[in-house]
Amino acid sequence: FSSSSALAAREVKSLGVIGAGQMGLGIALVAAQKANVPVTLVDTSQASIDKGLKFAEKLLAKDVTKERITQSQSDQIRSLLTPTTKMEDLSNVDFVIEAIPELPSLKMQIFSSLAQICPAHTILATNTSSISITKIAASTTKDPTDTSASSRVVSTHFMNPVPIQKGVEIITGLQTSQETVDTAVAFCKAMGKIPSQSADSPGFLANRILMPYINEAIICLETGVGERDDIDAIMKNGTNVPMGPLQLADFIGIDTCLAIMKVLYEETGDSKYRPSVLLRKMVDAGWLGKKSGKGFYDY
Ligand code: NAI
């Protein structure tokens, strides 16, 4: 990103995060910790909020134990997180990041509400893994020629786990303005992340490259080209990645891998993205990886 484009970035003094799950909680915590902004954390489930904040407190306590931050810094970061179950509490934030489940109709409903609730300058970002940013942006208005809200929609696609992974994909829809992109890039940098930009295309960049790699590893397993441990070992020891593709699939979630492969296959119509038969069967069996206790490995 050129430094001249960063001149158009708006200052972000407050953040709203929708969804206090795995990704939303991580995003809220890193924003408070690195960008030092107050974060309003919205979730419809009080149980998710309680679980998320407990996890945030655990991560902060670990940082104190490891002497990465002091106790008073930890208290200060924690005090920046304000949980709520009301979307209306986002009526005064400069930047919103949505991290609710990957359901198109739910996301569209949220963006339509955000366009009403938030001030006219607020950047409306989504953490979607696969849904078109252009479609999400279009849901902000009934009049497609009025881009006052849709031009502020962008994707900030964080990687899991958010406190650890530096990369974030900035994805633009057809309507996204340059000021929106510049503000998103600058804010992600303030969060200590390294942004890369991509167009609104199925799988964007990270999953477009990663998922066919994982799918191919599964095809190698099902067609007997290699055993599980050999497949993971050669990629781990041969390309210096922390884990092989089959173990990585277990960590991401086998169902998530299948969902993303389906998007790539259906939206491009290209047979090179066809999900492997074994990948489908694993999902049918309920072997979803680490979260379900069984995937390519047992947990
Ligand atoms: P999650 O299931 O852990 O969290 C979703 C949260 O949203 C839950 O706490 C739920 O109570 C809340 N929620 C549901 N409906 C809501 C509503 N209407 N308003 C407010 N809160 C609501 O999901 P996760 O894994 O954090 O994923 C969130 C998004 O991030 C998805 O779009 C996913 O595709 C994307 N993503 C996920 C990654 C992953 O590795 N899990 C990586 C990158 C992106």
Image (spheres, rainbow, N blue to C red):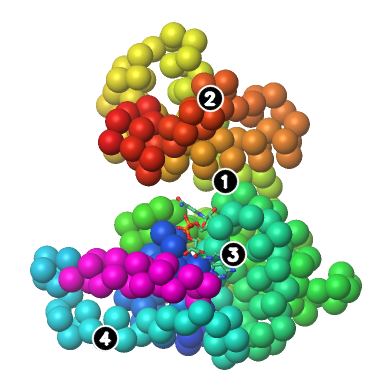
Residue position for label 1: 205
Crowding at dot 1, Cα within 10 Å, few <14 / some 14-19 / many 20+, comes out as some
Q: Tell me, for residue 281, which label it has, or none.
A: 2
Of the residues shown, which amino acid type is indicated by label 2? Lys
Q: Say whether residue 224 is visible.
A: yes
Tag 3: amino acid: Thr
Q: CA distance from mark 4 to mark 3?
A: 27 Å
Q: Going 51% across and 79% down the picture, which residue do you hit? A: 85
Disc 1 to disc 3: CB gap under 8 Å: no
List x then y, in percent, for residue 200.
68, 53
| Nearer mark to the viewer, of 3 and 2 | 2
The nearer-to-camera label among 1 and 2 is 2
- Which percent across, then down, holds residue 255? 51, 39
Residue 129: image tag: none
Amino acid type indicated by mark 1 = Leu
Query: Which residues lie in the magenta part?
Result: 42-61
The first of marks 4 and 2 along the sequence is 4
Distance (Cα) linking label 4 and label 2 = 48 Å
Q: Of 210 and 62, which appears nearest the observer? A: 62
**Number of marks present in the image shown:** 4
> What residue did someone put label 3 on?
126
Q: Which residue is mark 4?
A: 76
Q: Within 8 Å of ligand 1, the CB of disc 3?
A: yes
Q: Secondary structure at mark 3?
A: strand
Q: Examine the structure image and report whether residue 48 is included in the region drawn in magenta.
A: yes
The residue mark sitting in front, 1 or 4, is 4
Q: Earlier in the sequence, mark 3 or mark 2?
A: 3
270 up-or-down from 86: above or below: above
The amino acid sitting under disc 4 is Gln
x and y percentages locating residue 285 in the rendered image: 48, 28
